[in-house]
Image (cartoon, rainbow, N blue to C red):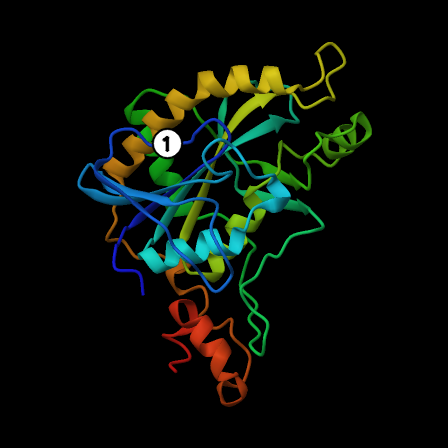
């Protein structure tokens, strides 16, 4: 078991590779039964709360979205004792009214990925979590409250299309998602949200809009240099918002997310392999003690 502990996890996406303001900083490398996370975790204290920061793509942005070991990232958060995850992510907009440089808290996801592992379960144990509401409403309320406290505009609600990447959308795809009335498009957050729910961790996406994808006829198609320009502008605002959320959030609160597995595991405990019990003990131990 990992000795270092944290209550709040922060996953920094494109453009957010560090969390300034942390005190008593230490780096912790964690190995999980699912392999290595994206990078070492940076642990410290912010506003009196223990925080674990992870650069989603690794420092220096080394990992493609499809190369991310989502299971290792979330499992390591669980080993650290994290109960709440604030996940910052760059996205494209599929709506005219959602503009570049806007911040959005989506409340739904549509999965268009093909190559990714999105569950901790298998190997002799079956669980079916409730995922109708894939992000934590209470944690979203706290982010929204923090945005108001610093007078920072943020949009609440909408559906995030999670695509495989790493190429951006074709115009045909972008227009199809618009006909489906989707709001945002990105490459990373769906798997994080599913795995956080299985790990009984509250999770919210803070989506930073960088572009209009490629559906807008009078706009230049999304490019890396445009994306990076907007990411740099958004990164400082993201740090302020996350810092204020951590300051305001009730880290002692309980939530239905923290009991997501209570009725989800359907395998007869008598037939769960001992090796699987050991591997998943941080997640299922309170329901299937070994």
Residue at 82 percent of width and 29 percent of height: 172
Quadrant where the image shows the C terminus: bottom left
Q: Residue furthest bottom?
A: 270
Quadrant where the image shows the N terminus: bottom left
Query: For residue 110, what is the image quadrant?
Result: top right
Residue 159, percent across and down?
Answer: 60, 38
Residue 166, percent across and down?
Answer: 68, 35
Residue 15, percent across and down?
Answer: 47, 26
Q: Residue furthest right?
A: 172
Residue 41 can be seen in this image? yes
Badge 1 density bin: few <14, some 14–19, many ≥20, Cα 10 Å:
some
Residue at 57 percent of width and 41 percent of height: 188
Q: Element under label 1?
A: loop
Q: Is residue 269 above or below residue 158?
A: below
With 187 as the anchor, is 240 left or right in this view? left
Q: Is residue 247 above or below residue 73?
A: above
Closest to the observer, 41 or 238:
41
The residue beneath circle 1 is: 18
Residue at 54 percent of width and 36 percent of height: 62
Q: Is residue 51 above or below residue 170?
A: below
Report the number of numbered marks: 1
Residue 56, percent across and down?
Answer: 48, 40
């Amino acid at each position: 078991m990992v000795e270092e502990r944290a209550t709040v996890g922060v996953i920094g996406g494109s453009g957010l590779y560090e969390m300034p303001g942390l005190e008593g900083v230490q780096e912790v490398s964690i190995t999980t039964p699912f392999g290595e996370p994206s990078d070492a975790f940076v642990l410290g204290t912010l506003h009196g709360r223990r925080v674990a920061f992870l650069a989603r793509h690794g420092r220096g942005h080394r990992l493609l979205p499809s190369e991310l070991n989502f299971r290792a990232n979330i499992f390591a958060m669980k080993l650290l004792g994290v109960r709440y995850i604030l996940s910052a992510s760059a996205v494209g907009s599929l709506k005219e009214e959602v503009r570049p440089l806007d911040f959005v808290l989506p409340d739904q996801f549509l999965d268009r990925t093909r190559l990714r592992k999105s569950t901790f379960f298998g190997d002799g144990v079956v669980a079916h979590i409730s995922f109708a509401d894939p992000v934590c409403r209470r944690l979203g309320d706290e982010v929204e409250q923090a945005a108001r406290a610093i007078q920072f505009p943020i949009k609440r609600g909408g559906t995030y299309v999670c695509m495989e990447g790493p190429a951006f959308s074709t115009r045909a795809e972008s227009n199809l998602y618009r006909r489906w009335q989707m709001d945002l498009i990105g490459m990373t957050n769906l798997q994080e949200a599913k795995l956080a729910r299985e790990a009984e961790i509250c999770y919210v996406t803070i989506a930073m809009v960088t572009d209009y994808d490629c559906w807008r006829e009078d706009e230049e198609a999304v490019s890396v240099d445009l994306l990076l320009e907007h990411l740099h502008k958004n990164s400082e605002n993201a740090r302020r918002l996350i810092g204020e959320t951590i300051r305001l959030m009730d880290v002692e609160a309980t939530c239905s997310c923290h009991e997501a597995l209570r009725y989800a595991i359907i395998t007869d405990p008598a037939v769960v392999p001992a090796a699987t019990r050991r591997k998943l003990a941080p997640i299922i131990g309170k329901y299937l003690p070994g």
